[in-house]
Image (cartoon, rainbow, N blue to C red):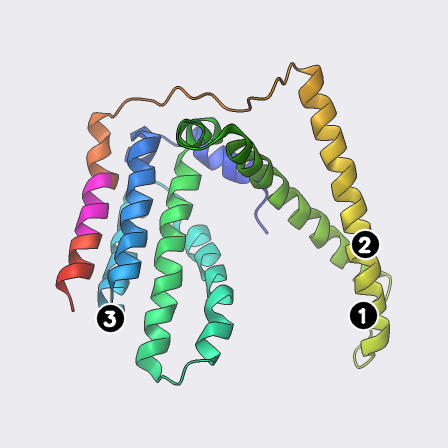
Amino acid sequence: MIDVARIDFWAASGSGRFHRASAIAKVLFVLLVVAAAVTAVSPYPLACAYVLMLVAATAAGLPVLRMAALSLYAIVFVFLYGLSLRGGPWVYALLFFKATTPAFAVLTLIVSTPFPRLFAVLSAALPEIIAAGLLMTYRTFFVLFDMMGNFISAIRLRGGFSPGSLVKNSANISKGIGMLFVRAAEQSTRIYAVMAVRGYSGRMASTDVEKMRKDDWLPLGMGLVILSIAIVWK
């Protein structure tokens, strides 16, 4: 699992065209790709869109292999829905790219945009309580995954997983999840205390949205091309 520090490093240290584009342009790019995924009735335009984004991300110096691997996690969310359908390979291929193509677009946004710039856009468009909740969710999501990974490693080293023993495994996992909730509550309390000491007064991100730039042609142009392919290719 990639930790939040690595993602923040990618977002802040890059100097490619995606990094130089404004956050609002990359958010619009994601919305255009999502619209293309909703519009498409064939897997081929979405497959072309995925390849196009891979090429653009490679040219922009983004961690393409890691991003491609992470985009495959989106398949989990459509797996059960796919099982409920009585379709052939065509339907499953369409669902695959409907999940992974927007996921790769979101990853492109995340790894090329420092989170203060990203949440400045969200804070300008959303109520403060929602924007603050999204920011806290973004930060704690990866922390909890890291804690879960440490728990799994620890329980394996201590012999907590026994092949064929469903009762024992379920008991250990339940205890681990309970511990995870306790640690999550402690982390939330610490984070709030640190924020209060540093002067938190109800606003977590700036609402000053950066202006459009000349490098915005890449995300905006690619988003429009992907949406046009999805509309034309029926």
Q: Is residue 209 above or below residue 135?
A: above
User: Can you say which quadrant of the picture contains the C terminus?
Assistant: bottom left
Q: Is residue 193 visible?
A: yes
C-alpha separation, residue under disc 3 versus residue under disc 1: 42 Å
Q: Is residue 16 above or below residue 105?
A: above
Q: Looking at the image, tell me whether mark 3 or mark 2 is earlier in sequence order.
A: 3
Mark found first going from the N terminus, 1 or 2: 1
Kind of residue at badge 1: Ser
Residue 124, quarter of the rendered image: top left
Residue span colored magenta: 220-226
Q: Quadrant of residue 28?
A: top left
Residue toward you, 231 or 221: 231
Residue shown at the point (37%, 70%) measured from the top left: 95
What whole-number distance in Å separates the C-alpha atoms at marks 1 and 2? 12 Å
Residue underneath mark 2: 178
Query: Please, what secondary structure does the residue beneath circle 1 have?
Result: helix
- Determine the residue positioned at 57% across, 47% down: 2
Mark 3 lies on a secondary structure that is loop
Which numbered circle lies on residue 42?
3
Residue 39, given in percent of the width and then of the height, sits at 25, 61
Amino acid type at circle 2 is Gly
